[in-house]
Image (cartoon, coloured by chain):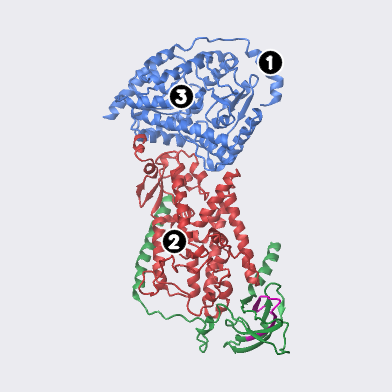
Chain colours: A red, B green, C blue
Amino acid sequence: MKKITMTRRIVQVFCLILLVYGGYIFKEWKQSPETEQSLFPALKAPAGSISITKLEKGSILWPSGATPVIENYPPSLVCRFNPKGGMFKACILHFFSENLTWQTQLKYLLPYITLFILLCFLLGRMWCGWVCPIGTTGDFLTFLRRKMNIPVKRFPQNFRINLSFTGYGLMAIALTISTIIGMPNFARYQCYWFLPYCQICPARLICPLFGLIKPNWKDFSTSITTTFTILAWIVLGLFIAAFYFGRRVWCHMCPVGLINSWFNKGAGVELHKKSIKCIKCGYCADACPMGLTKMYEMDKDGIYNQNSCIMCLRCVEVCPRKGCLSVKFFGKGIKIKDFFRGKNAKKIS
Amino acid sequence: MKKLLLFLIPILYGLAYGGEQIQIEFEYPSITGDFYVAGTVFFPPAAAPDLKKILVMDKDTREEIPSKIVVQDNWPDGSVLSAEIVFPANSQKKGKYIIFYGDDVERKKSFVEAAVLPTVSFIVPGAGTTVENMDVSVGQINVRVDRSTNIRYWWYILPVFFLILLTVLRTLRTIRMQKL
Amino acid sequence: MQKKFLDRYGRTVLKGFTSTRSIKSNANSELLEYSSRSKNSSMKKFYQASEDFETGKFLYPEKPVVGYFCSLVPEELILACNLHPVRLCCEENFWTQAGEEIIPGDVCPVVKSICGKFYNQMYDRFDLVVVPGSCDPKTKLAELLSPLKEVYFLDPGRDCEYLKNADIWEEKYTKFFDFLKERFHCSSGRKHLLSACKKTNARTEIFRKIYQFRTRNPEAINSFDYYIMIYASFFMDIEIWNNLAENVYREALETREICKNPKILLAGTPVIFPNFKIIDVIEQAGLSLAADIQCTTFGRFYNPVEIDEDTDSGIIRALSLKDIAGSICPCLLNLEKLVNLIVDAVSQYNLDGVIYYNLRLCQVFDIQTAVIRQALKEKDIPFISIKTDLGNQDTGQLKTRLEAFREMIESHRK
């Protein structure tokens, strides 16, 4: 009965291992140094940029462990704080912040942006539910809560909408600061303000732990680093609380997820509802980790993709009426339940 | 709300002014007793407005160490580019030192080389490269590596626009479907 | 229940009502007839159990027995406390007449027969009776039974909208669970709830198989067998029932009979054992009952418990969703759902018509008839509504009506 979630958990763990420990496994594959030769040009800080001088060992923004193995951006997030620098380098917000500061030419970014948009167009926000290492960590916290028999905290709709505004605010602030410090007149602030969101992101303190590396969890050398340290603690506290008492509440305000979410309604993965089959049992709305209710409320046939949906497909899984909720890929049916049930599916139908 | 403001204002104040630190490394000599540590440090543009804004600090105790600082070169905007720093140390204490600079730093202790003592030079790990690659005479801070124009990356614009267009169309369809 | 009421009137009520006593010693003679019609040898145990239960010889397990009405009462919570749940819904003419002496007048015959059975000490073995406030007669029934037995009144409310009421349901179910734990001195928790849900989910799985099988081949497990199985599930131990039902299903898979009669769907009032008049008439009219949407069968068994949060409150919430939000009880606000279900079932299982069965004096079922008729008329699905009581007087007339309905279906097919 719970085949989709089983698959999702396996995919999550596999992706966690690949993304976090990929740096150890794929040591050999290095970016071609000749920019013009490779499909994805190497993006580097301009020579003389102040921001790279600050990336000494022990600095907040130092990719923990050794040197980053591959200077590359996949379509979406893998943290720069992964041990060994990770298989891929950074998330989409990191990508934008960093290159706004470096003032990289647009044409060198285009290959990465294309890949990102292509994947988002095909899969929507599936990243959040199936791959994201931080989401996986959070799901583990939720699992712990369930084992401790602590009831879930359900947040009201308005609260969740406001959370997404917070996320947009954080994103706007981070990108604005990154743009400003890229300007020549403000370059001297780069040493403090480089990658402002990364400095408070919970992943900064969580990701190094996967490689048993102590994160740079405190830096009180200057007032700015002190502020960032304290902010990072507060955010980490919020993150843990959000995942421990609710389910995926954090994902409402994660700026990376918000960027992915713009593609959700037009994504190739479509969630369809056949409303005549619906018995309004509320299983789907109750099981939704993001607390969405569209699939329950919708009274007509059609697609119920929503921006906040993380495509965990839990609603499809729990629906007791076969054919009521279903997943389709560009309108073509993927009968997930049958796919897993195999031959018996036809017998029982 | 007032409490929030009271909480926020110090943070904002702290954000506006900040100091920056440089770690220095040197090897303790075999001799016992006092000696001087000297070396040249390069600063980012506009980071250290004048030599009063630079000081040497004990890393563990956070105490200021008396130091002599001589400016060697200035940035076009008048801030310190490089400075020679001398300060005393003792081989028995074996402390670690950092150089601290920035707007909110104020040097209070200075010293004069009274006795003739052996001098050990320190190095700043990771720095140096900063300044060498800069085009100082123009006053330009960000120097971009000149990469020859290559049209082939611009072709990516086509799929980007195509995908965005498709996404927008499909999104509109979904919204229409959900509305009716 | 309200203690004041009991203190003041309890004894008087008891005295007045128990003066007359009817005794029923023989099992229903129909039972033998039905069992002889069955083609499935594994069904014998179900018939045996039903006969035992009717005559009071049924051996309950060695644990407290809790009676309950309606599928709005969560069976899993009772199971989790290591109690034996028995559903007490009863539609029997004999007991209705006995109940007539206690509550005369135009009252729901189900409530009458339940009262008749209780006041004639048929259910003495029970430690607790749980009565839901699903409809008005049930609510009053809670008061009528309170002088005899300890009664727990569970009111889930009439609105089955998930968004508004989920928290309220969770609270009410939790209170009920706490009451059970306190009353029977057990400290049940997550483990017990999970194992109870596992049992009912296994039952759901088997029921679904049988239900789907009957939509294709209604003759292999005929409707008498089917409803006797349902009746046995009221009082039998759930695991024993699961095993027996599995056997029945396996045996049925081997038979390859093709059903030629028009297949129809039976909706409306639940059909409970002695009152098999309607099924008998349907069979005689040459129709075969292939699917049904009733609260004793579909409403009770079809939805599994989907546990998302496996904490105490999460499980209880899942139960409340299954039993209340997914309910097809006509007392709740869910007419649209019922119409959708009927239309969907007809198209999905290729059925030929719908019979809406309505027990006389049950108003909620009656009110729905017009809407369902109109909705099915739009979809061009043959529909007939039958309104009858527990007596056998109108059998001939019903048969004529259903035969006419059959002819209508056959002409509709062409």
Question: Could you give the CA–CA distance between mark 1 and mark 2, rounded to whole angstroms?
Answer: 84 Å
* Closer-to-camera residue (C163/C102): C163
Q: Does B103 sit left or right of A81 as displayed?
A: right
Kindly check if marks 3 and 2 are in contact, taking CB atoms under 8 A apart as contact: no
Question: Could you give the CA–CA distance between mark 3 and mark 2, rounded to whole angstroms?
Answer: 59 Å
* Closer-to-camera residue (C310/A207): A207
Q: Which numbered disc covers residue A25?
A: 2
Same chain under badges 3 and 1? The reply is: yes
Question: Could you give the CA–CA distance between mark 3 and mark 1, rounded to whole angstroms?
Answer: 37 Å
Estimate how packed mark 1 is, as few (under 14), some (14 to 19) or many (20 or more) residues with alpha carbons within 10 Å: few
Residue A324 seen in this snapshot: yes
* Closer-to-camera residue (C105/B53): B53
Q: Does C179 sit left or right of C76 as displayed?
A: right
Q: Nearer the viewer, mark 1 or mark 2?
A: 2
Instruction: Tell me the residue at 60%/57% (across/down).
Output: A238
Estimate how packed mark 2 is, as few (under 14), some (14 to 19) or many (20 or more) residues with alpha carbons within 10 Å: few
Which secondary structure, mark 1? Answer: helix
Which secondary structure, mark 2? Answer: helix
C307 w.r.t. C8: above or below: below
Q: Does C400 sit left or right of A159 as displayed?
A: left
The image position of residue B138, as x and y in percent, is 50, 88
Kind of residue sitting beneath label 1:
Thr
Kind of residue sitting beneath label 2:
Ile
**Chain holding disc 1:** C
Q: Report the span colored magenta.
A: B84-105
The residue wearing badge 3 is: C230
**Residue C116 among those drawn in magenta:** no
Q: Nearer the viewer, mark 3 or mark 2?
A: 2
The image position of residue B131, as x and y in percent, is 53, 83
Which secondary structure, mark 3? Answer: helix
The residue wearing badge 1 is: C12
